[in-house]
Image: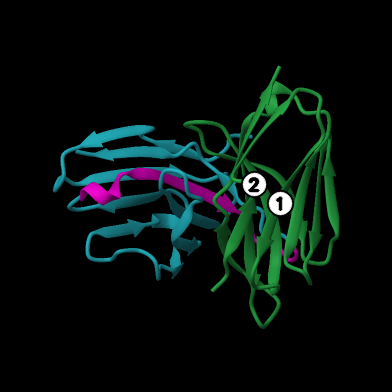
Chain colours: A green, B cyan
């Protein structure tokens, strides 16, 4: 059974700092990995998707890396801003023997990020 | 382009009452998912549809939960009767499954409180 763990559970930083959120998964047979942001009382916003054949993806101040063999992914946020405060979730989908996606996302519990001015 | 639409956004009911949630996926997306998110946890899949077919409902509590996706577009998730432990956020997501991509997009969710 795939298990996803996120460390730390909560993080508080001053504005302007660069920070790293960690995600680990137990089964390396993944199809892809997705990072999401969730604001309080809201749904999930997709930030980055990394295919299993890729090593990283970048979007603006966000950079996500993937090391499938070690079962790890990191989300790097550069020059953090108060507007980045939210819960960040990573999720993986497993791969079928035929190479297609199983479809189901398995989520970690999230990292609650607070960026204070 | 409109995102995933869900209604209602909030629902408060007494235990043993029925409740239904509605989801309209992103236009053209063939796969639809219902997830449940308990407080402080990541979402967990309840059921996945490919077009009209439920291809994974292994985690759906079938004694009280039911779902349908008529015509392969909108979907409804029902709970009857609701229990206190069903209080959670119910999230709908959709994706267009293409070779090499299965990016899922989520709606705002329905927050259910069972009293």
Q: Which residue is painted at 76% across and 22% down in the image? A: A15
What is the magenta range?
Answer: B83-100
Q: Is residue A55 above or below residue A96?
A: above
Q: Is residue A64 magenta?
A: no
Q: Residue A46 appears at what percent x and percent y?
A: 66, 43
Location of the N terminus of chain B by quadrant is top right
From the image, state whether disc 1 or disc 2 is nearer to you. Answer: 2
User: Chain ID for label 2?
Assistant: A
Residue count near mark 2 (Cα–Cα under 10 Å), binned few <14, some 14–19, many ≥20: some
**Helix, strand, or loop for circle 2?**
loop
Q: Please name the residue that numbered disc 2 is placed on.
A: A8
Q: Residue A29 appears at what percent x and percent y?
A: 69, 74
Q: Is residue B99 magenta?
A: yes
* Residues marked 1 and 2 touching at CB (< 8 Å): yes
Horizontal side of B58 relative to A114 (left or right) equals: left
Q: Residue B33 appears at what percent x and percent y?
A: 49, 55
Horizontal side of A35 relative to B48 (left or right) equals: right
């Amino acid at each position: 059974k795939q298990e996803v763990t996120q460390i730390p559970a909560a993080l508080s930083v001053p504005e302007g700092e660069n920070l790293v959120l960690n995600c680990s998964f137990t089964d390396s047979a993944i199809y892809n990995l997705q990072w999401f942001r969730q604001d309080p009382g809201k749904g999930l916003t997709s930030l980055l998707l990394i295919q299993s054949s890729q090593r990283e993806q970048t979007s603006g101040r966000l950079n996500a890396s993937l090391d499938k063999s070690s079962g790890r992914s990191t989300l790097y946020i550069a020059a953090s801003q108060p507007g980045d405060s939210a819960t960040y979730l990573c999720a993986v989908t497993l791969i079928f023997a035929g190479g297609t996606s199983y479809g189901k996302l398995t989520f970690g519990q999230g990292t609650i990020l607070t960026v204070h001015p | 382009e409109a995102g995933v639409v869900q209604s209602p956004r909030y629902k408060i009911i007494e235990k043993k009452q029925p409740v239904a949630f509605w989801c309209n996926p992103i236009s053209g997306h063939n796969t639809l998912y219902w997830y449940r998110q308990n407080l402080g946890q990541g979402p967990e899949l309840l059921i996945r549809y490919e077009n009209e077919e439920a291809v994974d409902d292994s985690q759906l509590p079938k004694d009280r939960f039911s779902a349908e996706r008529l015509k392969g577009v909108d979907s409804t998730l029902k709970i009857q009767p609701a229990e206190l432990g069903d209080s959670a956020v119910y999230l709908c997501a959709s994706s267009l499954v293409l070779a090499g991509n299965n990016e899922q997009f989520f709606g705002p969710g329905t927050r259910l409180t069972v009293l």
